[in-house]
Image: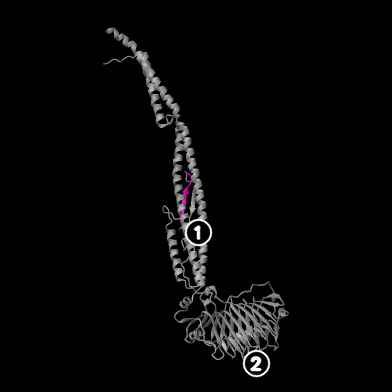
C-alpha cells in the first residue's frame, strides 16, 4: 500500500492559487469568446432569464414582421393590378368614344348596310320615287332632295309598311335629310293609304299655291291605316285664298285613319285656313305620352289642332301651340256629322299662345255632341301679351256641350269653365326641339369593329384580375388578408378585398345596336373606374397602416435586443485586462511554487 505523499504548506498553497487562477482564466476566456458576461443562469440567473425573455419576444416579433412584409407585398400586387386594370378601362373608354363618333357620322355606305337588302339610300328625286314604287321597306333620304313642281307628277305615295326616314334614324348624322316640293294643284306631298308606315327624321318643305282646295303635306287616309310619325320638321306655305274654307295642313288624319305622333314634331304653317294638325272623318290623332309637339301657325283662321266629323284627338304629351293671326285658335272641334272628341290625359301639358281663344268648343252641326274631356293632373298654360298663367286640373272634367252655343275657353273664364282648375307653378316645356335625329334609345349604329375591340380589352381585363393573386390571396376577387400585429395574436388587422371582375362591377360585354347602348357602356365604364379608384384608395390606407406597424415592430425588436444585450454583454476591455492580469498572476504563482520546492531540493543535495 502506497502511503500518501505529504506536500508542504507553501507548495499546497501555491497549487490552490494556480487552480483558482486557471478557473478564472477559463471564465474570462469564455467571456472574451462570447462577448457576454452572462452565458448561463449560473452566471446571473436574474439577468439571464430577463435577457432570454426579451430575446424570445424579439424573435417572435421578427417572425410577425416577415408576415407583415408579405402582407404589404400582397397589397402592392393588388395595387399594381388596379393601376393596370384602370388603364384598360380608360382604353375601353377611348374605344367607346370612337364608336360614338362613328355612330354620329354614318356614311352612305354605312346607311346602305343598315337599311338592308330590302332598303334603299336615295339622294335624288328619281331614286326616291323608284325606291317607293319598287316597294323598298326602308327608304333613307341622304341629303336634300328637291322634287320640284309636283303639279303634274304628283307627290309620294307610300306602300304598306314602308318607312321613309332620314339619316338620323340610324345615328346622329350630320348629313341633312330633307324633301322639298312645290305645287299649284291639290296635291299632297306624301300620301299614306296603306297600313304600317313610318315617317321619321325628315325635314319637309312644301309650298302650294292652289286657291280653293284642301292641301296636305302628309295625308294619312283610310280605315285601319295606322302611321307613326316622329322627329319631323314640316314647313308648309299655302295660298292666302280659300273661298271654300278647305283645310290646309302639315298632317291630315282622314277617313278612319290613325296617326301616332311621337317625339320632336315641329310644324310651321302659313296661309289661309292653315291648321297644324287635322283629324276628320272617323279618324284618330294620338299625341303620345312623352311626345314633344311645337306648332306655329299664322294667317287667317290659323288653328293649332282641328278635330271634325266624328273624329278623336287624344293628347298625352307636351304641346306648344302658337296661332297668331285673324281667328287664331288653339284647339278646335266643330264639324259635321255626329260628334267629335278631344281628350287631354293626366300627362298632357299644353301651352297656348293664341290671338283668339285657346279652346273652341261648340255643338256639332249634324246634331251629335262634341265632347271635351280633361283628366285630373293635366296642365294648361295661357300666354297673352307676354303674360303667362299656369294651371293644373285637380279633378276630371267632361263637357258634352249639348247647348248648341259655342264655348270659348280663355284665361279670362277658364276657372269658371273648368271646375277644379287652379293656378300652379310653371313647368318646363321643351324650348328647342331637335328634328335631325331620333331619340338615342332608337338610334341605330354600326360599330362592329369597335365593339370587337371593346370586348377583347374587356376579356383581358378579366384575365388581369385573375392574375393578381399573391401567395394564393387575390384581393381583387374578394379575397381577404389577415395580418397579426403582436405576439399574443390579440391584434389582427383584416385587409378586405373586393371583387372587381367585370361582372361584379356591372361592366357588360358590348352589344351595340343603338347609340343608347354605347352610352350605357360609357356609363358602366365611368362607374367601374370610380369603383377601382375607391378600392385603390382603400388599399392605400390599409397599406399605410401595415407599413406603419411594420416600422414600429422593427424598431421594437431593436429595443428588445438592445435591452437583452444590456443585461448580458460584457465589457471587452475589462475582460481583456482581467485575462492579462490572470496570466501575470499565473506566472507569479508558478514562480512562487518553484521557490517553495527549493527547500525540498536542498535536503536532496545532502545525499550526493
Q: From what the image shows, is residue 472 above or below residue 572?
A: below
Mark 2 lies on residue: 244
Asked if residue 479 is among those painted magenta in the image, a careful observer would answer: yes
Q: Nearer the viewer, residue 185 or 485?
A: 185
**Taking 539 as reference, is 309 left or right?**
right
Q: Earlier in the sequence, mark 2 or mark 1?
A: 2
**Taking 487 as reference, is 356 left or right?**
right
**Residue at x-position 48% and y-position 35%:** 563
Q: Is residue 72 visible?
A: yes
Q: Which mark is residue 336?
A: none
Q: Nearer the viewer, residue 326 or 426?
A: 326
Please, what secondary structure does the residue beneath circle 2 have? loop
Q: Residue furthest right?
A: 412
Q: From what the image shows, is residue 361 above or below residue 551?
A: below
Q: From what the image shows, is residue 539 above or below residue 423?
A: above
Q: Nearer the viewer, residue 340 or 554?
A: 554
Asked if residue 441 is among those painted magenta in the image, a careful observer would answer: no
Q: Position of residue 412 (x, y in %)?
A: 73, 79
Q: Bin the neighbour count of mark 1 within 10 Å (Cα to Cα): few under 14, some 14-19, many 20 and up.
A: many
State which region is magenta.
478-487
Q: Position of residue 372 (x, y in %)?
A: 65, 83
Q: From what the image shows, is residue 78 above or below residue 42?
A: below
* Color scheme of the displayed model: one colour
Mark 1 lies on residue: 532
Please, what secondary structure does the residue beneath circle 1 have? helix
Q: Is residue 506 visible?
A: no
Query: Label 2, label 1: how many angstroms apart (C-alpha)?
Result: 72 Å
Amino acid at each position: 500500500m502506497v502511503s500518501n505523499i505529504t506536500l508542504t504548506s507553501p507548495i499546497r498553497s501555491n497549487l490552490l492559487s494556480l487552480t483558482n487562477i486557471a478557473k478564472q482564466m477559463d471564465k474570462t476566456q469564455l467571456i472574451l469568446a462570447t462577448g457576454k458576461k452572462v452565458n448561463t443562469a449560473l452566471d446571473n440567473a436574474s439577468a439571464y432569464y430577463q435577457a432570454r425573455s426579451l430575446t424570445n419576444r424579439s424573435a417572435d416579433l421578427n417572425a410577425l414582421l416577415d408576415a407583415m412584409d408579405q402582407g404589404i407585398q400582397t397589397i402592392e400586387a393588388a395595387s399594381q393590378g388596379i393601376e393596370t386594370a384602370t388603364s384598360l378601362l380608360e382604353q375601353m373608354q377611348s374605344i367607346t368614344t370612337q364608336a360614338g363618333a362613328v355612330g354620329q357620322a354614318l356614311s352612305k355606305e354605312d346607311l346602305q348596310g343598315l337599311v338592308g337588302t330590302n332598303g334603299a339610300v336615295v339622294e335624288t328625286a328619281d331614286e326616291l320615287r323608284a325606291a317607293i314604287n319598287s316597294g323598298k321597306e326602308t327608304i333613307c333620304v341622304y341629303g336634300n332632295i328637291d322634287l320640284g313642281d309636283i303639279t303634274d307628277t304628283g307627290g309620294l305615295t307610300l306602300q304598306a309598311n314602308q318607312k321613309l326616314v332620314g339619316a338620323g334614324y340610324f345615328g346622329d348624322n350630320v348629313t341633312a335629310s330633307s324633301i322639298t316640293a312645290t305645287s299649284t294643284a291639290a296635291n299632297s306631298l306624301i300620301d299614306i293609304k296603306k297600313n304600317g308606315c313610318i315617317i321619321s327624321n325628315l325635314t319637309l318643305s312644301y309650298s302650294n299655291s292652289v286657291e280653293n282646295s284642301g292641301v296636305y303635306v302628309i295625308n294619312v287616309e283610310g280605315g285601319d291605316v295606322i302611321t307613326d310619325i316622329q322627329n319631323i320638321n314640316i314647313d308648309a306655305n299655302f295660298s292666302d285664298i280659300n273661298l271654300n274654307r278647305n283645310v290646309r295642313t302639315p298632317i291630315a288624319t282622314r277617313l278612319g285613319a290613325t296617326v301616332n305622333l311621337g317625339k320632336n314634331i315641329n310644324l310651321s304653317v302659313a296661309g289661309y285656313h292653315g291648321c297644324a294638325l287635322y283629324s276628320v272623318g272617323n279618324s284618330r290623332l294620338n299625341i303620345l305620352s312623352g311626345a314633344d309637339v311645337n306648332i306655329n301657325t299664322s294667317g287667317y283662321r290659323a288653328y293649332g289642332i282641328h278635330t271634325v266629323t266624328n273624329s278623336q284627338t287624344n293628347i298625352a304629351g307636351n304641346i306648344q301651340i302658337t296661332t297668331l293671326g285673324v281667328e287664331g285658335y288653339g284647339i278646335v272641334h266643330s264639324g259635321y256629322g255626329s260628334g267629335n272628341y278631344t281628350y287631354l290625359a293626366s300627362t298632357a301639358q299644353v301651352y297656348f299662345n293664341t290671338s283668339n281663344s285657346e279652346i273652341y268648343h261648340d255643338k256639332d252641326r249634324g246634331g251629335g255632341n262634341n265632347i271635351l274631356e280633361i283628366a285630373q293632373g293635366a296642365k294648361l298654360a295661357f300666354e297673352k301679351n307676354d303674360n303667362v298663367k299656369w294651371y293644373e286640373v285637380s279633378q276630371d272634367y267632361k263637357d258634352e256641350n249639348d247647348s248648341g252655343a259655342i264655348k270659348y275657353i280663355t284665361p279670362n273664364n277658364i276657372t269658371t269653365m273648368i271646375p277644379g282648375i287652379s293656378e300652379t307653378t310653371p313647368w318646363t316645356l321643351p324650348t328647342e326641339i331637335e328634328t335631325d335625329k331620333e331619340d338615342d334609345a332608337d338610334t341605330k349604329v354600326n360599330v362592329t369593329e369597335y365593339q370587337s375591340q371593346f370586348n377583347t380589352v374587356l376579356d383581358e381585363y378579366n384575365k388581369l384580375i385573375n392574375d393578381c393573386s399573391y401567395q394564393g390571396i387575390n384581393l381583387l376577387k374578394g379575397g381577404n388578408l389577415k395580418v397579426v400585429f403582436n405576439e399574443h395574436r390579440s391584434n389582427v388587422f383584416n385587409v378586405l378585398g373586393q371583387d372587381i371582375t367585370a361582372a361584379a362591377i356591372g361592366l357588360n360585354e358590348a352589344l351595340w345596336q343603338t347609340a343608347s347602348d354605347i352610352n350605357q357602356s360609357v356609363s358602366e365604364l365611368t362607374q367601374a373606374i370610380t369603383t377601382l379608384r375607391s378600392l385603390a384608395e382603400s388599399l392605400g390606407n390599409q397599406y399605410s397602416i401595415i407599413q406603419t406597424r411594420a416600422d414600429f415592430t422593427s424598431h421594437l425588436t431593436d429595443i428588445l435586443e438592445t435591452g437583452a444585450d444590456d443585461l448580458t454583454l460584457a465589457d471587452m476591455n475589462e475582460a481583456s485586462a482581467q485575462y492579462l492580469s490572470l496570466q501575470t498572476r499565473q506566472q507569479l504563482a508558478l514562480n512562487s511554487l518553484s521557490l517553495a520546492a527549493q527547500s525540498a531540493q536542498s535536503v536532496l543535495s545532502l545525499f550526493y
